[in-house]
Image: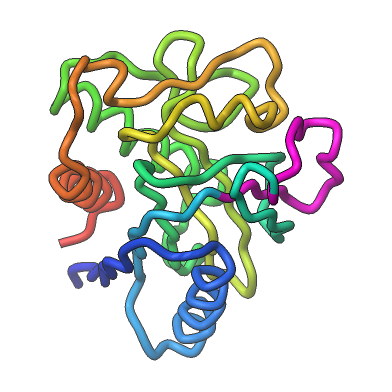
Amino acid sequence: MDKKLNVIYAGRMSYENALELQLKTQKERMEGKIDDTLILLEHNPVITTGRRDQSHNIFVDPEKVGAEFVKTTRGGEVTYHGPGQIVGYIFINIRDYRKGIKSFVNDLEEVFISLLREEFGIEAGRDDKHRGAWVGNSKITAIGLAVNRDITMHGFAFNVKPDLSHFQWIVPCGIQDKGVTSLEKLIGREPDLEEVQQLVIKHFKKIFDYQ
């Protein structure tokens, strides 16, 4: 049977509102009310952390720079999200995936590695110590997941055309010796966010074998 992927375009919203949407969607997926689902959106500026204390990796008062601050249940350390990123929240039954969470993350990285190579001629890859998609020594896609009752939550943040100076507010993902980049910086022009969204969906469906 062909696998189906439900794609939701949620526009731009606060992290808190997106978290409510995530919890609702994860519950519906647990109950079998919906197929596997990918939510694509942009966030207002927000600094998020995982379950561990990250105060030593945050250099600003979020309120003073106009950003939200949210502590989440995902893995990973401190991240910044903001306009110009494509954020994807993923709700997939990991049992149906059958290959385990490590392979799931590998495939998620491959979505962006193949997208950058095939659509833009950019050679991206993985880092042995840090998850995500990297171009040289700079991260272009951050990945952080949580799993509850076999259903994934959280997902990825792909830097299409964010304000890269905002990453100086934090130590991204707690990694001090590496940088952050964007598609805009790499190709030398402003990409169309909606067009890139469609490319993300194309490669996500290809890598995860959706119809």
Which quarter of the rendered picture does the C terminus lie within?
Answer: bottom left
Identify the residue at image location x=54%, y=19%: 127
Q: Does the magenta portion include 51?
A: yes
Which quarter of the rendered picture does the N terminus lie within?
Answer: bottom left
Identify the residue at image location x=62%, y=58%: 146
**Is residue 51 positioned above or below 157 on the image?**
below
Horizontal and vertical percent position of residue 111: 31, 38
Residue furthest front in the image: 64
Identify the residue at image location x=32%, y=33%: 161
Q: How is the image coloured?
A: rainbow
Quarter residue 92 falls in: bottom left
Q: Residue 183 or 129: which is nearer the viewer? A: 183
Q: Is residue 5 left or right of residue 150?
A: left
Q: Does the magenta portion include 133?
A: no
Q: Residue 63 or 176: which is nearer the viewer? A: 63
Horizontal and vertical percent position of residue 137: 50, 10
Identify the residue at image location x=23%, y=32%: 115
Horizontal and vertical percent position of residue 8: 28, 70
Quarter residue 53 falls in: top right
**Is residue 171 positioned above or below 37 on the image?**
above
**Is residue 13 positioned above or below 208 on the image?**
below
Q: Give the magenta-colored segment's residue range.
A: 46-63
Q: How many marks?
A: 0
Quarter residue 210 falls in: bottom left
